[in-house]
Amino acid sequence: MKMVFRWFGRADDNITLKDIAQIPGMTGIVGALFDVPVGEVWPLEKIRALADEVHQSGLEFEVVESVNVHEDIKLGLPSREQYIDNYIQTIRNLATVGVKVICYNFMPVFDWLRSDLAKELPDGSATMAYQEEIIKATTPVEIVERFSEGSQGFSLPGWEPERLAELKQVLELYEGVDEEQLFQNLKYFLERLMPVCEETGIKMAIHPDDPPWSVFGLPRIITNRENLVRLLSLVDSPYNGLTLCTGSLGANPNNDIPAMIREFGQMGRIHFIHVRNLKLNAPGDFYETSHLSSDGSLDMFEIMKALYDVGFDGYIRPDHGRMIWGEQGRPGYGLYDRALGAVYLTGLWEALNKMS
Ligand code: DNO
């Protein structure tokens, strides 16, 4: 496995590449161009500049998260053709600088969703939380406002202002789209992409829906084992794979994460994994914890063991961390707690390796 760390770029991160390179065991960053509007081609010169900057710090740049998918593709509108052509050109440009995996998601309108971006825990740290009853009592417009107020001045991944500005119209467009239709639209998208993925060697790795159930009446399909099986069979190619996110899928206690890792890992379809822990209070009520097994509801040893047993050789990153030690950072993406998480996961891996 290769341990990597998400970085938002020099212009929009409180963390430097030097900070990241100093984390023990870190091999590379997970990056993106955040100033290209969703749907447009990522220019080669900009990608190259980012890659050069990362390489100069002694880190690799082999994973992109995310190349976001334009809503017209998810909606299956005729205008999707142009956006898919653009996506394909972006894949080609990313391959040119050595990118191997693209993480993306197919969640209508909203990406990850929380009711609280800074819930205070008894130890004084701050974390992100989700309570279904709060979400149910909040309108989509209010949630967008809450995210922008709670973002500490940072942009939040997946919450692109230009898309959310047209919230009402976009939500209306989804009124006729159910889960079945969304699957068909995903299949269409993947079928168009696969030849160029095979040609360039870039693997597509879909991120699960977070949380893994419908929000605001919108369809969500990347939610459980059965739907993941269906997704992989939409196009049965190793280039159609997964970003297995333990925290997203783990919000539903019926999702057995180690079992999923074993099943999909054996098939060679997990290209990237986000490892994070969370504490489930009740269905639809959770908050994110440190990565440590004993702090949350997920067993990190069992997760790492499943990865180890299937011979996982893809990319792994610590996922959301709490704000600790007085850090003022992008919610979920500070330096300290994620660095602790990374080293903890690397330590579990070392133990598994030496015990085997
Ligand atoms: C949130 C992230 C997501 C993820 C996208 C991938 O913190 O896990 O925004 O990057 O869903 O497309």
Image (cartoon, rainbow, N blue to C red):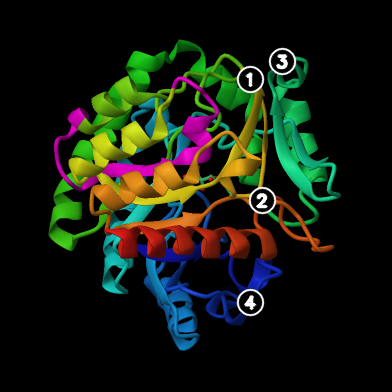
340 part of magenta stretch = no
Work out which residue is located at the far bottom of the displayed protein and give it.
56
235 part of magenta stretch = yes
Q: Amino acid at mark 2?
A: Gly
Which one is closest to the eye, mark 2 or mark 3? Answer: 2
Q: Earlier in the sequence, mark 4 or mark 2?
A: 4
Q: Earlier in the sequence, mark 2 or mark 3?
A: 3
Give how far apart the Cα atoms at labels 2 and 3 are. Answer: 23 Å
Q: Secondary structure at mark 4?
A: loop
Is residue 54 shown left or right of residue 115? left
Range shown magenta: 233-254
In the rendered image, the quadrant that contains the N terminus is: bottom left
Q: Which residue is mark 2?
A: 332
Question: Marks 1 and 3: CB-CB under 8 Å?
Answer: no
Q: Which residue is mark 3?
A: 136
When the figure is inspected, residue 115 is found, relative to residue 63, above or below; the finding is above
Give how far apart the Cα atoms at labels 3 and 4 are. Answer: 38 Å
Give how far apart the Cα atoms at labels 4 and 2 are. Answer: 16 Å
Task: Give the class, few, some or many, for how many residues have Cα within 10 Å of label 1's Cα (few <14, many ≥20).
Answer: some
Q: Secondary structure at mark 1?
A: loop
Question: Marks 3 and 4: CB-CB under 8 Å?
Answer: no
Q: Which mark is residue 284?
A: 1
Q: Nearer the viewer, residue 42 or 269?
A: 269
- The percent coordinates of residue 29 (x first, y second) are 47, 68
